[in-house]
Image (cartoon, helix red, strand yellow):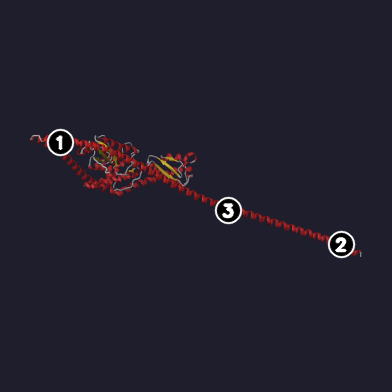
Amino acid sequence: MVGIILLGGLGFFLGYILADFLGKTGLKKKREEAKKVIEEAKKEAENIRKKAELDSKELLYKLRVNFENETKSRKKELEELEKRVIHREENLERRVEFLQKKEQEINQRAREIEILTKDLEKKSQELNAILAEEKQKLQRISSLSLEEARQLLLKRLEEDLVKEKAERLRRFEEELREEEEKKAREILSLAIQRCAVDHTQETTVSVVNLPNEDMKGRIIGREGRNIRTFEMLTGVDVIIDDTPEAVTLSGFDPIRREIAKRTLEKLVADGRIHPARIEETLEKVRKEFEKELVEEGKRVTFDLDIHNLHPEIIKLLGKLRYRTSFGQNALQHSKEVAIIMSIIASELGLDTRLAKRIGLLHDIGKGIDQQVEGTHAQLGAQLLRKYGENELIVNAAESHHEEVEFKSIYSVLALVADAISASRPGARRETLETYLKRLTTLENIANSFKGVEKSFAIQAGREIRVIVKPSEVNEEGVVILARELKKKIEEEMEYPGQIKITVIRETRVVEYAK
């Protein structure tokens, strides 16, 4: 019995221990499971947070893009509105200016009417005086003898003959001038029509475009060594300013400037810019440019069908492509003169090939006149004589600016063709000061004559219109005034081509019906 009780107590104790062990083991597992649940919850919370951040960033990006698009749209609308406002302001300014001009014209017309009214009153008084004088003469004639009447009649007849002589002289001069102008227009229009070439205005600067702004720093180099080397070797100035993606090359010698421009373009394209590379590229460009000058000279001689020229002359012709005179390209000018001379020579029955050769070579001295002292006409004559050209060609080149005496008609043709090419509208540009000075001088000469009321220089100074006072200059005096004005302009002015003189004598009578 006691043994059974002991066994029961031992079993109970062992059961208790086993239950306690199993309870602790289950609790541990529960804790581990709870820990796993907590970690998974944390991970899920982190994922939710990250997703929320991504969603918020995406939303913020969309809002920003929409805001920028809306801002650009509003900015574009504002710019268009600003352009419309500026355009309206410009239109208003133009209208105001137009109204001011109209007001000035009206005032000027009123002054002219006032002057004409005074002239009309004066004329009326003069007419009354003439009528009274005629009445007195008629009264006197009625008591004249036969001889006295004959003398009076001869005197009147002499006055009529003087008037008729002036009218015939004026008519013959107009017919002769019209015939001369007609023939001259035929020859010159044919010449200019065949040599219609394009002219470009050369300046003393060239612009080189850059791929980006960083290239400016590479061109300058460390402590400016690259730009100093480039300027020293090429002989041109490099101007680096705020102009975006561009530098400017400045120099008076167009050939040096062109070589420098091509060298810099090659260096920029290559990307390697340092003193040794600059010197190497410059030498290569110079050799290529020399070949190009020869090719350009050969192309011109081929176009004009001129052969047997010395190689140095061909090279100098190529150099003329990079020379200008008052904005007119020297090579194009030489080609024009050659064509004009050949056409005029053909009209006059002369040697057209010789005339064309003279026209092409007349300005050859411009290819070297920057390196050697002397005028381009003298230098050109020396060159042509050195390379064995005909003496007629040498004299034409030397005398086309009237520095020496003409020795043949070809020299005169060279002078004429050179003036035609230079004076053609659009061929050359003149400085504003010279242009205004010529117009002012022309008007001052016209105003210096007695009886001139107003004068206007028009057509860029190639025509002068003179308005005379009818009370001081009669019909015969208009012819005399035009001839005297022509002589004075020829004596006191220097100008290309010719100046047309138009003298206007006009009497106006205005009445108003009310």
Q: Is residue 352 visible?
A: no
Residue at image mark 3: 59
The kind of secondary structure element at disc 1 is helix
| Mark 2, residue position | 10
Mark toward the viewer: 3 or 2: 3
- In the image: residue 303, left or right of residue 156: right
Disc 3 on helix, strand or loop?
A: helix
Q: What's the CA distance linking mark 3 and mark 1?
A: 112 Å
Query: In the rendering, at what x and y percent does residue 191 appear?
Result: 27, 47
Which dot, 2 or 1, sits closer to the camera? 1
- The three-letter amino acid code for the residue at tag 3 is Leu
Number of disc labels: 3
- Badge 2 marks a residue whose secondary structure is helix
Q: Which mark is residue 337?
A: none
Residue 287 % position (x, y): 39, 45
**In the rendered image, which residue does mark 1 sit on?**
135
Which amino acid, by three-letter code, is at mark 1? Lys
> Of marks 2 and 1, which one's residue comes earlier in the chain?
2
Quadrant location of the N terminus in the rendered image: bottom right
Give percent across and percent down for residue 303. Answer: 30, 49
Q: Residue furthest right?
A: 1
Q: Quadrant of the C terminus?
A: top left
Q: How many C-alpha atoms fall within 10 Å of the one at disc 2: few (<14), some, or many (≥20)?
A: few
Task: Evaluate whether residue 90 shows in this view.
Answer: yes
* Residue count near mark 3 (Cα–Cα under 10 Å), binned few <14, some 14–19, many ≥20: few
> In front: 335, or 233?
335
Q: Earlier in the sequence, mark 3 or mark 2?
A: 2
Which is nearer the N-term, disc 3 or disc 1? 3
